[in-house]
Amino acid sequence: MLSRLADSLEKVLGPDAPRPAAAPAGFHASGFLGETLSFQLALQREEGDPGDGALRLELEGPLAEHAQVSVVRRVPVSFPSPAPERADEHYLVTEPGEYPDLLEPVEGGRVRVDTGVWEALWIDVRVEDEAAAGEHELAVHLHAADASAAQPLASHRARIQIHPHRLPELSILNTHWLHADSLAVRYGVEVLSEEHWRLLEAYLAAARTMDVNSVLTPVWTPPLDTAVGHTRPTVQLVGIREDAPGEYSFDLSALDRWLQVCADAGFRALEMAHLFTQWGARCTPKIVVQTPQGPQERFGWHVEATDPAYRRLLEQLLPALRAHLDSRWDGQVLWHISDEPGEEDLATYEAARAQVTDLLEGAQVVDALSSFEYASRGLVDTPIVATNHVEPFLAAGRRPWVYYCVSQGKDVSNRFIALPSVRNRVLGRQLFVHGAPGFLHWGFNFWWAQHSLHAIDPFEDTCAGGAFPGGDPFAVYPGPDGTPWLSIRYRVLAQAMADHRALSLLASLAGAEVATRLVDEDGTLTYSAFSYDVDAHLAARRAVDEEIVARLALAGS
């Protein structure tokens, strides 16, 4: 058996031997209490190795009880990279195929791998107890599962350092939209049934572990990624009853349960579902109203954004909703008008905004849009700008939220499966250096084809029916029994946010200039230009950590 340790920024593609672990100062992983530290054991079973492909895994050392092991599985990627004019030379692969992404938990210390190709085990270490901090070795032994010989097929010792301090909470907002309907459809449960609530709790908890701290809240069915005239399954936390023509009352009990789940999980902010449809704000969201004749889809694609009947509903609903949130939610509340309007949509967006301007007075309105014209006209309080369109905002002295998705495939950071992991992780330091107050991604678990025309199997389709580069629609897979299975990209994005937290801590101790200097690549780090040198990236994070520890020691003395 061939084997070697690899760091968490390597993707073990299969045919070729992976890059050996970058180990700054001799450590394969290092960080702070409560931080998930990851490394990989890459291996290639050869013909003639004992056993039939099944391996028995053994961990040894004081960190063994703090370690979790997954096997990296390849998933189908039909659309690895955008068209050539929207891609660049840094993609690991450009042809359709099966590539590493899924982290399948190893159960009972047994794992099966193929012969003749490089595979990988992903090992996470998370230490909460200060007594377990320090420098440790974690031994990893692989045996043939059916062999009784004491001699392992492979053994490696990973050196891990845990600093006896904790990082502060993430100082910016970080949202990756959770799609509640995907959970109900994939697991075959009724929306807002007890089974659905259990799924929501599990996936919201998984989002928090990725350092997501703001959550899209389906007070009505979010009008996102839905073909014109088509509808997604109803997920509406606010019950609406028409008591007389144009007169409504509201049941907020399901919303209260959502608020409690989010509070218990540690979310800091709620985003209300968009008030108008995507890509232009021309229509109203799907809203179900209880009437004497039964439930009716009173609003949706068939109702224009400026319809007086919608205004009449909002005049009653928004004040009641805002007052309720003020009394029941301690964190931030963000409001959306419409997602991703273009310059050609200025008039319709402005008309839709006028429908609710007085009703949202004093509230924070945030929207993903990239035209500077919206900001200059004051149509949105907090623009969320695509990373490949942010330069005019920075040049004007603004420090906007940023986002990326399918269209940000050239030069800028992204999380596509076909991209090197360093291009995912660099986001944390980019957000810090450029003072972004928030980051948004649209797909935590979008398990639909494009425009939500039909559900997909995420284990067989990572590209939303071939519409988006693999990995864009989701960061987690639907594991059995309602358990989220994670991806490499999930873990690396969490590392990016941990980098931001470490930089924020150092800035609080020594000033932002000191922290920035350690990661700014000699002043050249932008959203579209950064180093792909993994060793340098990991060494810079270690330098940040060492400076933190030194400053804390100095303060303590």
Image (cartoon, rainbow, N blue to C red):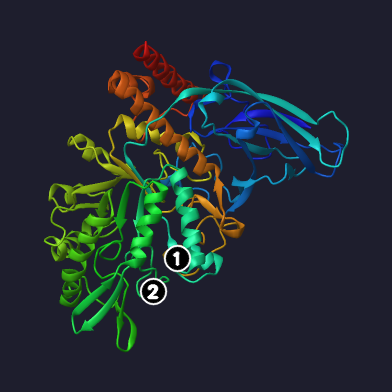
Residue 408 rendering spot, x and y as whole percentages? 39, 46
Residue 497 rendering spot, x and y as whole percentages? 41, 36
Give whichever of 527, 327 is nearer the camera: 327
Quick check: can you spot residue 448?
no
Q: Residues within 10 Å of mark 2 (few under 14, many from 20)?
A: few
Question: In the displayed structure, does residue 127 sit left or right of residue 235?
Answer: right
| Label 2 or label 1, whichever comes before in sequence order | 1
Question: In the displayed structure, does residue 413 sit left or right of residue 111?
Answer: left
Give whichever of 6, 370 is nearer the camera: 6
Reading the image, the residue beneath label 2 is 230
User: Which residue is painted at 57% across and 23% down in the image?
Assistant: 22
Question: In the displayed structure, does residue 256 sit left or right of residue 153?
Answer: left
Residue 488 rendering spot, x and y as whole percentages? 55, 42
Residue 529 rendering spot, x and y as whole percentages? 37, 31
User: Which residue is painted at 13% across and 63% down in the image?
Assistant: 354
User: Which residue is painted at 36% across and 69% down in the image?
Assistant: 236
Quick check: can you spot residue 84?
yes
In which quadrant is the N terminus drawn?
Answer: top right
Distance of label 2 from label 1 (alpha carbons) = 15 Å
Q: How many marks?
A: 2
Q: Residues within 10 Å of mark 1 (few under 14, many from 20)?
A: many
Q: Are marks 2 and 1 in contact (CB under 8 Å)?
A: no
Secondary structure of residue under mark 2: loop
Reading the image, the residue beneath label 1 is 181
Residue type at the position of mark 2: His
Residue 70 in which image quadrant: top right
Q: Is residue 469 above or below residue 225?
A: above
